[in-house]
Image (spheres, helix red, strand yellow):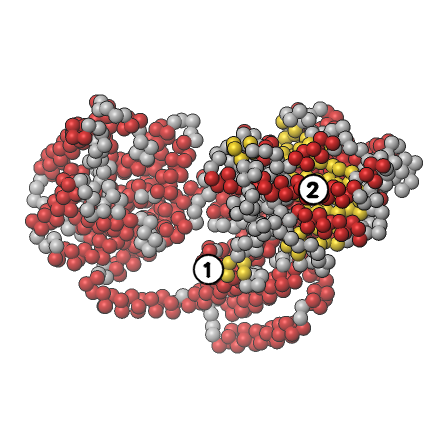
Amino acid sequence: MDLLIYGIILLTAFSSLYWQHTPQIFLQETISKKYLIANVIRGFSVTGIPITLLLLGYFMTRTRKIGIFQAWGFLFIGTWCCLLVACFSQDSTWIGHFYNALLPVLRNTSPLFSGVLLAILTNKVVAKHLMNERYAYYLFFLFTFGVPTIFDKDIFNYSGGTTVLYAWMVFTLGANLPDSGLSKKTWCLLTSASAIVLAIMLALMPLISEGTHGDLSTATRLTDAANLFTMLFSFCLVHLLLNLKLNRVQLFSLLGSVLFSTSSFLIEALNTANEKSTWGIRYMELFETILVFLVIWSVVHIYVKSKFFKKLSKLDKKLDSLYLADLEKNIKLILVHFKRALSSHKLVLIVSGVMLVLAYISMVITNVGGRVADTIEGDKSYNALTYAILQRPQIIVINALLFAGLYLFLRGLTNSFWFSFLVSDYLIIIWCVATYLKIASRREPILPSEVAMLGAYRNLLNMVPHWILSLGVVVSIILLCVILLLSWKVKVKKLPLKTRMKCVMIPAVVVCSSFFWNHDDFILKKPMKMLGIDPTFYNQLNGAQINGPTLQFLNNLDVVIMKRPEGYSKTKVEAIIAKYSELANEINKTRTNDLSKQTIIFNLSESFSDPNHVKATKLKGDPIPYIHQLMNETTSGYMISSGFGGGTANIEYMTMTGLPLANFSPTLSTPYTQLVSTHSYNPSIVNYFSNAVAIHPYVGNFYSRPKAYENLGFNDFIYLGSKKKIKHQEKIQNNPYLSDKVAYANTLDVINESKDNGQFINLVTMQNHMPYNKAYYSDNTEFEVEEAVGLNDEIREQINNFATGIHYTDRYVAEFIEQLEAIDKPITLVFYGDHLPGMYANDMIKDGLNLHETDYFIYSNKAAREQGARTNLGKSRYISPNDFPAMVAEATNSKVSPYYALLTNVYQSLPAFYIGSESNNTSVRNVEYVTEDEKIVSEQNLTEDQKELLSDLRIIQYDITAGKNYVKDTDFMKIQSSDGNE
């Protein structure tokens, strides 16, 4: 018996997996013996579904061995187990699949199960009016499956045996199976005969198809679960099995095979994995068939022995009397049970309801002007009141669970329900108010770094409106009185010590786990991503809006800045300081200028890059002729970006500090928000100038720029909404971003307003920011793309728009250079693109380096050239963003500090840093190096001198960012003349 049942399970699993990829033999256009045999095997392999549905119909309605709640529980547990496996094995799994498993009927994701439920509810009526006689039963059988088979028309919408109606039909037939007086031997003969007939028909169909149509278009007509011959064989086999008897484990195993066969997401996941397998698809499918059988067998045995199963059994006993015929009576009975359940669980429901409401409120208060999702595109936002409910319901639940964790923690500590519940509510409300006030004033949520500010609570309280503080005090007094009154009047049962320990430990473990959330090998990394949890470090406000402020706060706890370099110590740092102090003196002997007396402009041109430089991409003409001419006349080449399609702030950070992102831990994804805005010591090129201004013709809250620029030493940050206004505000045609022309106009204003000889300006433009699939320009075909990988209408439109945008940039750069030439003070412009736009379809593995190469040049005006500025540096073809500080010092012929001597040595002696594919290691990035002849080498291929230099850089970088700051109180960052004087 077991062999027969498990054979059916294997057959169903095999059918679900094997026929997903059409075997090569079914692609042939002529009949062969192998083709006929394959068609017969395929026809028999689909009988698992009707056999199982017939058996379930009989045993769930006649012998009551399986109830509907038990079946739902098995569906729920089995599907969730499969989903968890899929979500850990795949990069992404849709969160909706979990809802589908929970509510299979409402979401109609398991039509066979929905059909079974419908059949159970209607069976009493059907049995009474449609199948009350044996002849009526057989008439129903022949009509429902004979007519569609004979006329080859799916009039009942069976879809080969995958619909609700099909499951209802077959299950109903099983539920009303007439008692048979035939012997076991007779049924064996009938089963054999029906099998022979099915085999003959399956073998004849290809011959009939070829004879009738001249091809094999209808050869597989009978290879589905809904034709008459398949059903006859299944009917006879089921009668045979009924004589042999079946137990509960066997029935649930059959149900498991049905659930698997309808789990399209899991089958799709397995097929995706099979395509990548080196075994070959067919071998993998056979292996998975056996694996599926073993999993089903294991899950069934665990399930039928669980407490959950026993509780569902009780529900099934109550359901036995609930049929559509007694609808009014049953509704009243259900209402009685429902009220009792509400009463017995009222405290749990109160806590759950309040926490859900507070979680929803905590997400709503992150809005700006009644809107949420303050995205970088600038044109996408949502109503604050509906966004969380309609688009992020799972995040509301997660935040509610976090809030409930606070209640449980307090309950475990105090064992007082009312104190724990009301105090946790009050603390959550205070958290929401504080978050609202922070966002209203700074457009940024509360971050872990600000917890240290609690020490200055007096100053913090002074920032809060007095009426709010007064209200808080009054509410605290009232709350205390309410807690005492309720604790006296409404007694709640105390928790045992074991339960209290769990209440304390579970929330503590959850919070502590947040210190690992951003680690690549964290076990819940993929499930969290699947749930839609995205730290969004580059935009903390948007992160709070999509995750909730509480979840976003916890996301920011996991920051490992950098792995401690081997040999790091105060003695080693002092040795490095002495080494590069000597090198600085040597360099300064040939340098004549003072960097602080120069005007330096770092112009990050958003997404600027030449499409013609991208492999297999060709435009009609050259959209940036002036910049190409300028690159031929100045120091220029390609900057190796750390990002593709994004990562602007990371490039900014490297250009100003000289510290490569490559040396940081992968968990430090955005230094501005995770490092600079939380640290007081952030040495940068800004520190060498008495006047430093950042300009960004856009909103300024992204990447925590206001705080980051303040900590880097800028005197002013000019952006849309800043105290010092963006004076010039013009756009090009339909482009929503301010143009590069006005970016340069605002920059010229800052230069002309400065009376100081020296000035540093960090200009970040927005004109060429995504998206590019908008009708921004009416003349976007002047430099139309002719060739590109995967070229289609969408890619064509994007490249055309982008090419038009950078052509405008080319024109505005020419005007800007002309204006700089006329200014009588030394000015040096470092112009560079931060990353390529993410619109190219090139293979990242094959063309990865090419997709990280952006154009750059260093230009010095007439006044700077007269002071000895250099127009052609020795190494320039491939550089890293962190090379710019050393390069600009050399280009302006300026003296250097010991730190800049180190950066100069790094720039001149090390290949450019290239962050390739992400590493699974949580402390070290996967870094390679690009030589001047565009060869990629690993760290192992560097010379010993280069490795020593890289070690010196890492030690200094670690000391500055994550170490003891030994260099802080030394002259390492100070520029000295060749005689040793400052």
x%, y% of residue 328?
23, 68
Which amino acid type corresponds to the residue marked 2 in the rendered image? Val
User: Which image quadrant: the N terminus?
Assistant: top left
x%, y% of residue 94?
43, 47
Q: Report the residue at 68% width, 48% height from top.
A: 741
> Which residue position holds label 1?
389
Q: Report the residue at 31% width, 26% height from top.
A: 24
x%, y% of residue 5?
24, 38
User: Which image quadrant: the C terminus?
Assistant: top right
Q: Is residue 744 visible?
A: yes
- State left or right for residue 32 relative to residue 402: left
What is the secondary structure assignment of the residue under circle 1? helix
Q: Is residue 685 above or below residue 384?
A: above
Q: Quadrant of residue 727?
A: bottom right
Kindly report the distance in space between the C-alpha atoms of the residues bearing marks 2 and 1: 47 Å
Which of the two discs, 2 and 1, sits closer to the camera?
A: 2
Label 1: how many Cα within 10 Å (few below 14, some 14–19, many 20+): some
Residue 862 disc label: none
Q: Is residue 55 visible?
A: no
- Tally the marks: 2
Residue 813 disc label: 2
- State left or right for residue 657 relative to residue 28: right
Compare residues 19 and 791 and report the one nearer the observer: 791
Compare residues 428 and 341 and report the one nearer the observer: 428
Which amino acid type corresponds to the residue marked 1 in the rendered image? Ile
Compare residues 413 and 672 and report the one nearer the observer: 672
Q: Quadrant of residue 627?
A: top right
What is the secondary structure assignment of the residue under circle 2? helix
Q: Is residue 461 above or below residue 266?
A: below
Of label 2 and label 1, which has the lower sequence position?
Answer: 1
Q: Report the residue at 42% width, 68% height from top.
A: 346
